Amino acid sequence: MSADDYLALITSEHRHRPKFEAVVAGLAGPFVEMQAMLERMRTLHDIDTATGVHLDRAGEWIGRSRYVAIPLENVYFSWGVEGLGWNEGYWKGKYDPDRGMVRLSDDAYRTVLKAKIGANRWDGTIPGAYEVWRTAFADIGSVVVIQDNQDMSMILGITGVRLDNVMRQLILQRYIDLKPEGVRISYYAVSNSGAPLFAWNCDSEGLAGWARGAWPEKILPFHPDHRQGR
C-alpha cells in the first residue's frame, strides 16, 4: 500500500482539507515505508529471487557453500568450443582462477541449494526422489529417470535439455547428490541432445523407443574420497 491508499480512506467530512490530509500522510508515510522495507527483505532472502550476498546467507542457513572444493573445468566461455559458446559458457570473473571455476554463479548455486533443501526433507523413497529432482531442476527443464538395480545401486538418467558443463561437474562432484545412504550411483545416463533416453517399448517424457529415443552418454560420479569439505 501507499500513503495515497490511506488518504483514500478519509471520510467525506475531512476530505479535501489540506492540513488534515497532511497529518494523515505524515503519520502513514513511515508505516508504508516500513511495509515496503519488510517486503524487500522477504524478496532479498527468497531463494527464488535472492542474489549475491543475500543468496550466500540463504546458503548458510541451508548448509551449502557457493564455493566448490575442486575447480569446475571447461566451463568458461570460449569461441569455437562446443558447449562453451553463446548462452553456454560462463564468463570468467575478475578473481576466478584460470584452472577452473570455484565460485558458482547465482543460477547454478540456486539449483544446488534447492537440491540440498529437497535432500534434507526427502523421505528416502523413489517417488520422493522424483519430486526432489523435479523441484531442483525446475528452472533448468531437465527430466530425471531413476532405475533401481536391486543391488544397492541405481542408475540416474537426465534428459529434457542438454546440461551445461557446470551442471555436469556439480552432479559428478556430488554437490547435487540424492540417494539413500549406502546406495551407490553406478553412472549417470545423460542425453546430449535433450531428447528422451532410448528404452524398448517406452513412450514417456524421459524414455522413448526408436525414432525419438537417444543413446545416452554414460558419465561416472567422482568417488567421495576425491573431494573434501562437502
Image: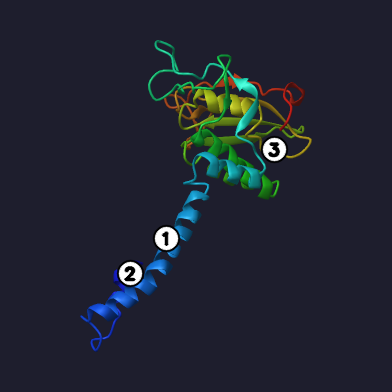
The residue to which callout 2 is attached is 3
What distance separates the C-alpha of mark 2 from that of mark 3? 52 Å
In the image, which is nearer the foreground, mark 2 or mark 3? 2
Question: Which residue is farthest top?
Answer: 80
Report the amino acid beneath label 1: Ala
Q: Nearer the viewer, residue 127 or 51?
A: 51
Classify 10 Å Cα crowding around label 3: few (below 14), some (14-19), many (20 and above).
some
Decide if residue 190 is in sight here.
no
Q: Residues within 10 Å of mark 2 (few under 14, many from 20)?
A: some
Judging by the rendered image, the residue that carries numbered circle 1 is 36
Looking at the picture, how far across and down is residue 119, in whole percent? 66, 44
- Return the disc, 1 or 3, that comes first in the chain's sequence: 1
Which is more N-terminal, label 2 or label 1? 2
Q: Amino acid at mark 2?
A: Ala
| Element on which disc 1 rests | helix
Q: Nearer the viewer, residue 91 or 191?
A: 91
Q: Are marks 1 and 3 in contact (CB under 8 Å)?
A: no
At horizontal 72% and vertical 24% (from top left) the residue drawn is: 227
